[in-house]
Image (cartoon, rainbow, N blue to C red):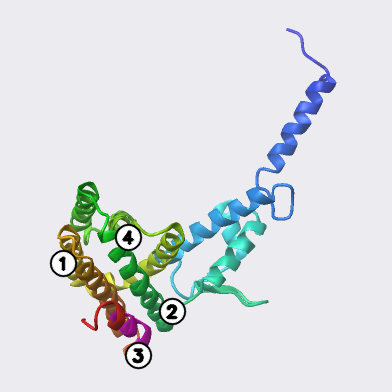
Amino acid sequence: MSTRSSDSPREQRSAENGSEAQASAVPTAGAPGAVGGRRLALDVHARLRDMILKGELPPGSALLQAEMARKLGVSRTPMREAFRLLQEEGLIDARPDQRARVRGVDPEDLDGVYGARIMLETLAVNVTAKSLVAGDLERMGEALKRMRELAGQDLPDKWHAAHREFHGIATQAVGSHLQRMLASLGEHSERYIRLAQLGMPSSWARAHADHEALLEALRLGDPDEAARVIARHLARTALNVLADIAPEYEPAATRTALGIAGNGQS
């Protein structure tokens, strides 16, 4: 059997190109692969965000960029960008020369998120109620059934997936910009929904009754009642969590939004 003592120039160039491609598999911002680097940073941000919202990184946890980069198998560059995005969202505190930490539950943040969500989601539900068809209502019913079956089973990912689907169908008729805002607020709310479920087990039954009432209003083609139901539903979650973690806090945004969108009913 013969062996080759050297590669041809073409083979050498091919090997060199292969090495270069492998070295650039994780692009960095500012390099020719900046677009890929940005995409990687967004992926890392999404993963860390999910860990915070699920409680895998609880409030007060110290976050070291080098350690998290090793854990997720990425370089420091996308990790720095992910940390910056998390700080902009208010999920972490990252001061110069100090360790970043997961922020605790901020009553003002919760109040602001739910105040905004009440206003925007009641608008979206009111608009969507006028265009839902039988297939949409059937899918909502199936999502609601899954939520009921998963309640209390310690399968939060599956429950929240069904929950997002249910609310997503109920607000599907609005434009893409508002859809993105609703999705962002909904994801931010998951942290607080989990707190409500843990701190008040009876919230499962109350939330299910709210969802059933929303679906019934949509089946009846009553957009005003659907808007009132979703406003009360969202406000109830916010007020329950606030009563548990910060009973002294006055939730002005949530109560004002409820007064506007829910006709002052609670």
- Mark 4 or mark 3, earlier in chain: 4
**To which residue does mark 3 refer?**
250
Q: What element carries label 3?
A: loop
Residue located at (65% from left, 54% from top)? 75
Find residue 171 and name its label: 4
The Cα atoms of the two marked residues, 4 and 3, are separated by: 29 Å
Q: Looking at the rendering, in which quadrant would you find the N terminus? A: top right
Q: Looking at the rendering, in which quadrant would you find the C terminus? A: bottom left
**To which residue does mark 1 refer?**
209
Q: Is mark 1 on a helix, strand or loop?
A: helix
The Cα atoms of the two marked residues, 1 and 4, are separated by: 19 Å
Range drawn in magenta: 248-258
The Cα atoms of the two marked residues, 4 and 2, are separated by: 23 Å
- Mark 1 or mark 4, earlier in chain: 4
Q: Height in image: 111 above or below 136? A: below
Is 14 a magenta residue?
no
Q: Is mark 2 on a helix, strand or loop?
A: helix
Q: Can residue 209 be seen in this view?
A: yes
